[in-house]
Image (cartoon, rainbow, N blue to C red):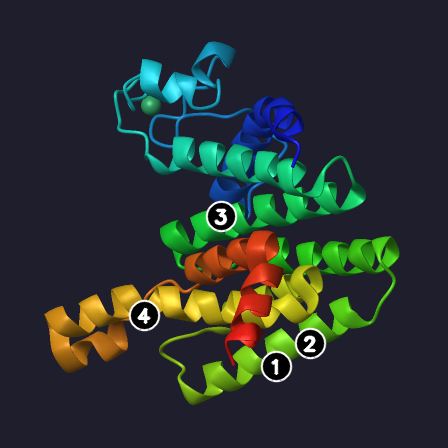
Amino acid sequence: MDVALGLLAFWPALALGSFVNVVAARVPLRRSVVRPRSACMSCGSELAWYDNVPVLSYFLLRGRCRSCGTGISLLYPAVELATAGLVAACFVVFGLSGKAVLAAFFCAVLVAITATDITHRIVPNRIVLPAAAVVLVAHTALSPSPEWALGALGAAGFLLVAAIAYPAGMGMGDVKLALLLGAMLGRLVGVGLMLGMFAALVPSVVLFARHGAAARKMGIPFAPFLAFGAVVALFVGKPLLDAYFSTF
Ligand SMILES: [Zn+2]
């Protein structure tokens, strides 16, 4: 455990969180993530640097654009805080290592996908596929083993069967997301998928209670739950798996 390293990583990771916001807001609209500068999505006025400070600016502006007063989604500071917290946790848990950098990249991608699934109900190919390839190659280079490729294929295959059996619940985006999860988690991906599905049961049950059979057609964005399960599996998947097997 290296808490000091985590604290050190937190501040630059807030800036990374800002970039995650840009990616999550622009990629689903097929816009460049590099140009132009950040601007209000409503009135288009460019943000001065002091209105673009992660988390802080949101609260100083009380969640409103300085020019037009349109509300800014609470998702923006949430994405920045989640990215920074997860990246810091990666360095606390994995130390100053290649694995920590890889895990931090993985977490940042999961935050971006969670945001696009909440706002646009999509898991963009242009985020998830390159990320899965990068994680698979980097992980195999860091710890040479077929585990990462097998994890990716196994998890994607499992969700593909689930998506075919229950098309309302899952989409092909979730299948591609499973590729990424397996490449990072290897054999622990089973833990991540199970936790994700259990977590998704909670809103599903609430929807059923409220809307009855009509809830079957509503569906919920599934990627945030898979991302949640994957993050838990990343940090405590091994002890969870050991505890599970020692109970039987
Ligand atoms: Zn504005």
**Depicted 88 relative to depicted 222: above or below:** above
Q: Quadrant of residue 108?
A: top right
**Depicted 210 relative to depicted 80: above or below:** below
**Depicted 232 relative to depicted 196: above or below:** above
Q: Secondary structure at mark 1?
A: helix
Q: Residues within 10 Å of mark 1 (few under 14, many from 20)?
A: some
Residue at (47, 41) in percent of width and height: 25
Q: Decide: marks 1, 4 in contact (CB < 8 A)?
A: no
Which residue is nearer to you in this view: 78 or 245?
245
Kindly identify which numbered label has been placed on residue 29: 3
Residue at (61, 58) in percent of width and height: 128
Kindly identify which numbered label has been placed on residue 157: 1
Distance of mark 2 from mark 4, alpha carbons? 24 Å
Residue at (56, 74) in percent of width and height: 246
Residue 245 shown left or right of residue 114 in the figure: right
Which residue is nearer to you in this view: 47 or 212?
212
Which residue is nearer to you in this view: 24 or 107?
107
